[in-house]
Image: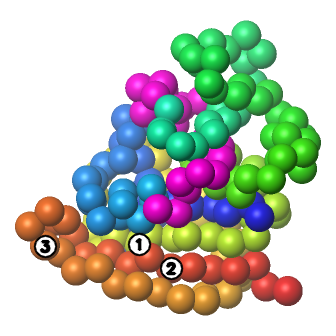
Amino acid sequence: MIIGILAEDKTGLIGKDGSLPWHLPAELAHFKKTTLDDAILMGRTTFEGMNKRTLPRRTTLVLTSDSNYDPGSDEILVMNSKSQVLDWYKNQDKTLHVIGGAQVIQLFEGDIDRFYRTIIDAELEGDTYFPKNFDWTQFELVSEEAYRRDDKNMYDFVIQVLDRKK
């Protein structure tokens, strides 16, 4: 299964200076639980926004057009095209989580079977937005869980699970 996973504020903001414009431990815990022991795919900018570090117990794929890109670790699988990613995916048994950035999620829009979409109840400042032309009508809401602001999470948010319509 190919799963898209993203978090955005009410305006569609997903990034600021190559990283997340918020800190929500409960949302990060959901991300970890959802992606653990699977594969994660991200673009070079997202990877560099994570300081080129790997996440434990996840196979990390980085998509970049730079065929000489050095990820700084032999643990990172560098892919140079969508077809290379899909070939890798078809020849192994892990779920692939497409985690960003916006261009990578849009590139795989037609391949994503399920989405985990976090919507943060805030309007924050940043520089990267989820594509407004993404066709959410391809997906149907399966479930939604609300999280309330608390001493560790400064915003309310909901996590939606959306499956591709049959």
Three-letter amino acid code at the position of disc 3: Asp
Three-letter amino acid code at the position of disc 2: Gln
Instruction: Give the crowd class for mark 1: few <14, some 14-19, many >=20 residues within 10 Å.
Output: many
Residue lying at 85% horizontally and 40% vertically, measured from the top left: 88
Residue lying at 46% horizontally and 28% vertically, measured from the top left: 53
**Is there any visible trace of residue 83 in the rendered image?**
yes
**Spot occupied by residue 135 in the image (x, y as percentages of width and height):** 71, 72
Closest to the camera, between mark 1 and mark 2, is 2
Three-letter amino acid code at the position of disc 1: Ile
**Spot occupied by residue 141 in the image (x, y as percentages of width and height):** 60, 88
Instruction: Report the quarter where the N terminus lies.
Output: bottom right
Instruction: Identify the residue position indicated by label 3 in the image.
Output: 150
Mark 2: secondary structure:
strand
Whole-number angstrom distance, CA of label 1 to CA of label 2:
8 Å
Mark 3: secondary structure:
loop
As drawn, the label of residue 119 is 1
Instruction: Report the quarter where the C terminus lies.
Output: bottom right
Tag 1 and tag 2, C-beta contact below 8 Å: yes
Q: Quadrant of residue 122?
A: bottom left
Mark 1: secondary structure:
strand
Residue lying at 63% horizontally and 26% vertically, measured from the top left: 76
As drawn, the label of residue 160 is 2
Instruction: Give the crowd class for mark 2: few <14, some 14-19, many >=20 residues within 10 Å.
Output: some
**Spot occupied by residue 57 in the image (x, y as percentages of width and height):** 53, 43
Q: Earlier in the sequence, mark 3 or mark 1?
A: 1
Q: Earlier in the sequence, mark 1 or mark 2?
A: 1
30 shown above or below 74: below
Magenta extent? 33-53
- Of 82 and 3, the residue lying toward us: 3
Whole-number angstrom distance, CA of label 3 to CA of label 1:
16 Å
Tag 3 and tag 1, C-beta contact below 8 Å: no
